[in-house]
Image (cartoon, rainbow, N blue to C red):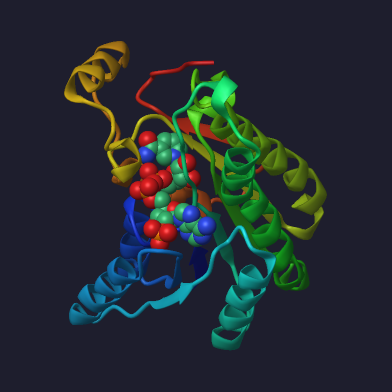
Amino acid sequence: MKNVIVTGGSRGIGKCLVENLAKEGYNVILNYNKSEKSARKIQNELKENGVFIEIFKADVSKKEDVKNLISFALKKWEKIDVLINNAGIAKLQMFQDVTDEDWDEIINTNLKSAFYMSQAVMPSMVHEKSGCIINISSIWGMVGASCETVYSISKAGMDALTKSLAKELGPSNIRVNSIAPGVIDTDMNSNIDEKIKKEIRNETPLGKIGKTMDIYRCVKWLIEDEFTTGQVISINGGYIIT
Ligand code: NAP
């Protein structure tokens, strides 16, 4: 079965990906940074059902941590088949108020992490002439978000990374794609009140807010697909149609 690394697997979308991929029989490393308790809980609950995953603490915005994570993976497995760059943070603020620290934190966590992780898995994937990288970007990288400019920039950068790497790595049979979710029900959106949620539902042709499973279904399909690369697939209920 394929070997999969999910960054930011301790909560939200990443947690859903880890749990479901592991239950499907994939070998999974759950990367976490701050939420150790949650990572251990996921590992233990899966274990109770006879499903085993590895967990590994790494701040994926730091090169040394990424190096340690990949070394850990390559000691466990001979190769890494799938990398899911999912770790991310968001911050609502007026562009006028963005500090150097805000910029660095968001860009490094959301985008530089994908640079470090992708570069680190490449030798293994190129050697195998096989691999799949999935970048979890966002609709806001496609259309821009007021008061989330830096976040939007980081996600647009991810999509550019996807398209460029797809061209560079296609000849090595490595597929690189983005999934750009719309609004998905996770901690990241815990600050959105019910009134705003209702407005979002009203503006969404499918009339609902997304669930983490909506992203999982696309991830699973992309992992097993053989002819899709360089694409930004937006899972958003029709909230944006480009
Ligand atoms: P979430 O519930 O807030 O979870 C974020 C995850 O990222 C956590 O597991 C967190 O781990 C991890 N993380 C953050 N910084 C990290 C770092 N430096 N190193 C390693 N892990 C780190 O968010 P989510 O909604 O699941 O979002 C997952 C991804 O989907 C993000 O990239 C987000 O931008 C994207 N997305 C989400 C939505 C949405 O509506 N929810 C929409 C579009 C795109 P720890 O807690 O262990 O630090």
Report if residue 227 is visible in the image: no
In the picture, which quadrant includes the C terminus? top right
Residue 52 on image: x %, y %: 33, 80
User: Is residue 97 shown left or right of residue 118?
Assistant: left
Q: How many marks?
A: 0
- Most foreground residue, 119 or 173: 119
Percent across and percent down for residue 97 are 55, 26
Q: Position of residue 204 (x, y in %)?
A: 31, 16
Residue 177 placement: quadrant = top right
Observer-nearest of 190 and 159: 190
- What residue is at 67 percent from the left and 72 percent from the top? 64
Image-quadrant location for residue 133: bottom right
Which of the two residues, 14 or 220, is positioned nearer the viewer here? Answer: 14
Q: Residue at x 30, y 33 (%)?
A: 210
Height in image: 25 above or below 232?
below
Q: Is residue 105 above or below residue 193?
A: below
Q: Residue furthest bottom?
A: 75
Asked if residue 20 is positioned above or below residue 100 in the image, the reply reads below
Q: Is residue 104 visible?
A: yes
Residue 108's spot in the image, x, y percent? 63, 49
Instruction: Name the residue located 61 percent from the left edge and 71 percent from the top edge.
Output: 65
**Which residue is located at x 71 percent, y 42 percent?**
161
